[in-house]
Amino acid sequence: MKKLVIVESPSKSKTIEKYLGEDFEVVSSKGHIRDLATRGKDGLGVDFENEFAPTYKISKDKKDVVKELKQKAKKADEVYLATDPDREGEAISWHLADELDLDIDKDNRVVFNEITKDAVLNAFNSPRKIDMDLVKSQETRRILDRIIGFKLSKLLQSKIKSKSAGRVQSVALKLIVDREREIDAFIPEEYWSVKANFYNDGNVIETQAEKFKGKKLEMKNEEEAQTVYDAVQGDFIITKLDKKARKKDSKLPFITSTLQQEASTRLGFAAKKTMRVAQKLYEGIEMGKEAEGLITYMRTDSTRLSDVFVADTKKYITDTYGKEYLGKYRPGKVTDNTQDAHEAIRPTSIERTPDSIKKYLTPDEYKLYRFIYFRALASLMSAAKYDAVSVSFTQNDYDFNGSGSTLIFDGYLKVYDYEKNADKILGELELNKAYKAVNVEKNQHFTQPPARYTEARLIKDLEELGIGRPSTYSMILDTIVYRAYATFGAVSETSRTKVFKPTDQGILTNDRLQDHFSSIINVNYTANMEDELDRIASGDENNVEALQRFVDKFYPLLEEANEKMEVVEVEKVGEICPEDGGELVYRYGRFGKFIACSNFPECRYNRALDTEKRPEPEKTGEKCPECGNDLVKRKSRYGTWFVGCSAFPKCRYIQPNENSKKKKKETKEEESEETSAS
C-alpha cells in the first residue's frame, strides 16, 4: 500500500505529491478537523475539576473528511503528518493522530519551512515525534480564548448588547479608543517658523531659523516671528559647514508583521489580503509542467536566513552586480517574544526572479512576490553611501540651518526601488562667506493631534507591545470592524488613507470592560500571557498552573461584573417598522450606525440614518450603453461618486473611472485561509 501524507491545504497536497512520487498519496485535512465542544461547565468544553481537560468535537463540515482520512490511514503502510510548521500546525497533527488512532510516540511528524523538492524530500528523511509542548501551548491559548470569549461575550450581550469580546481583540479596541480620546482632548498650540532660501550654483538651499545665540529658538506667536523676520533682512554668513560620508543600511528581510505593515503602506494591500496571497505563494504555483512553493513559510517572527540561501544569494549578487554590492549578513536581534523556529520570509530560490515567472502569477501575486524577493535580496547587499552636508547661515545671532545629500553609491538601492532616493544638492559652499537670501518668509502653524490608527500602524504597535501574534492580526482587526466596534475608512474624500475610528458601541464596550476587567484587558497582562504561552511551548511553564492562575483572577471579576454592570437599553428611534409593526431601534454595523427593526432577525427591515440619506441620483444626460436607460450620478456608501445605470439592479453597468485602470478579474477562485495561526 502507499504511504499516506496528510497536509492542511488541498493546493499544497498537489504540489507535495509530485515531489514524493508514486509510493505516496498526499491528502488534505482542510485545516482544523475539530475544536472544543460546547458542553460541560458553561458550555466551554473544559473540565475545570480535572486539570482543565478539554473535550473535543469533530467540526460538522469535517465529518466526511475525517471519515475518509480514517479509511485511508487504515490501508496505508505509513502515515505522515505534514501540517504547517507552527503551534497551530502542531496541534492539527496531534488532533489527526488522536482521531486516526496513530502512535503519538512514533516519528511521523514531518516539518518543512518551504515547499520545494529538496526541502520536502529532506524533511521526509528526518521525521520526528509530535512536539507536545507546542500542542499544550496551542491548547492553552484555545482554552483561554474560549473562556474569555464565551464568558465576556455573554456578559456584554446581556448588559450592553455588544456582540463579542476577546483576549487580544479587546486590547486592540482599547488602543483605538484611547487614541480617539487623545484626539478629542487635544488642544492645538500655535507656533511660527521663519524660513530663508538661498540660490547657489543653480540649486535652491532651504533653511529654517532654529537657534538664537546658540540656544534653541521657539516662536509661539506672530510678534516673536516678526522680530526674527525683521532682524534677518541683510546678508547671511556661513558659520558652520560640515561634510560627512554617511551610509544607509538595507532593512532586514520580512517577518509576518513587517510584511503586513509594508504591504499596506507600499502596495495598498489589507493585512488579510497580504496573508491570503502569501499563503498561495507558499503553497505552490503551477509553472508549466511543475508546481513549486515560491516563498518560505509566511508566519514567522524571525529575520534569520538559512546558510544555503545566504551563500546562494551572495554568489548571485557578486555575479550579477559585482563584489562592491555584496553586504554583510545581519541575522537581526532575537527578543523574548521571537519565535525563531523558522526563517524570515524569503524566496525559495534567488535565481527565480520576479520577471522570469511573472506570466504564471496574478497581478497581486506578482506584486507581493516581487516585494518579498527584492527585500530579501537587498538585505544581503551593501549599504547606500551619501555625501551629506549640513550648513548654518547666520545673521544677527540667528542660525538658519539647512542640509543636503548626494548619493555616491547606490548599494542595495540598486534593486530595492521601494525606497525613493532624491538628491538634495547644495552646491559648493564656503565657510565665512556672505550669502544673500532670495526670500525670507514667516509662517503660522498649529500642533496636530495624534493620527488615528491605520492598519499598518496598529499592527506595528500591537507587535511592539507584544500583544497577540502577527499571523492573527488581520483576523483580529477584521473582527473589530465586523462587530461594529470601529469603522475603517478614508480620512476624507480626497484621501486614500484608511483609518480606524471607534463607534459609540465600541467606546461603550471598551469602557465597560475597563470598568470591570482593567486588570486583565490591558497591554501588560495580555503581553505577559503571550510570554506564558511561549514558555509553555518551550517546556518551561506548566500549562495547568497557567490556566489556574488565570481562572483565579478572572472569575471573581466576572462575578462582580455580573452584579454591578449596568444594563443599557437599546436606543429607540420612536417609529414603527413599516414591514411588521415592531419598534425601530438604532444599531451598529461595519459601516456605522443605522436604523433597524427590533424584531431582527425575523424582520430584516433597515435603513440609513435620516441625516445620512444618500442624495437622489442626478441624471448625466447620457444613455446606458448596455440597456439604453439614463445614466445617473450616485454616491456610494463609502462617500465616493460614480456613474451607473438608472435601472440598477436590473442593469449593473458602471461607467469606468478615467483616472483608474480597470482591474482584470481573477480566473481562479480564492482559497480560504487554512487556519488561524498561533
Image: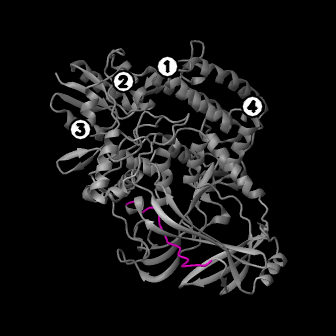
Residue pointed to by mark 3: 117
Residue pointed to by mark 4: 561
Secondary structure, magenta segment, majority class = loop
Residue pointed to by mark 1: 55
- Which residue shows up at 67% across the image and 41% down it? 161
Q: Residue furthest top?
A: 50
Rendered location of residue 302, percent (x, y): 46, 39
Question: Contact, CB < 8 Å: mark 2 with mark 4?
Answer: no
Query: Magenta stretch: residue 428 in it?
Result: yes
What is the crowding at mark 2: few (fewer than 14 residues within 10 Å), some, or many (at least 20)?
Answer: many
What is the crowding at mark 4: few (fewer than 14 residues within 10 Å), some, or many (at least 20)?
Answer: many
Specify the amino acid type for callout 4.
Answer: Ala
Q: Earlier in the sequence, mark 1 or mark 3?
A: 1
What is the crowding at mark 3: few (fewer than 14 residues within 10 Å), some, or many (at least 20)?
Answer: some
Q: Earlier in the sequence, mark 4 or mark 1?
A: 1
Residue 48: quadrant of the picture: top right
Q: Quadrant of the N terminus?
A: top left
Magenta segment: 415-430
Specify the amino acid type for callout 1.
Answer: Thr
Q: Give the spatial CA distance, label 3 vs label 2.
A: 25 Å
Residue pointed to by mark 2: 96
- Which residue shows up at 38% across the image and 40% down it? 297
Can you tell which of label 4 and label 3 is closer to the viewer?
3
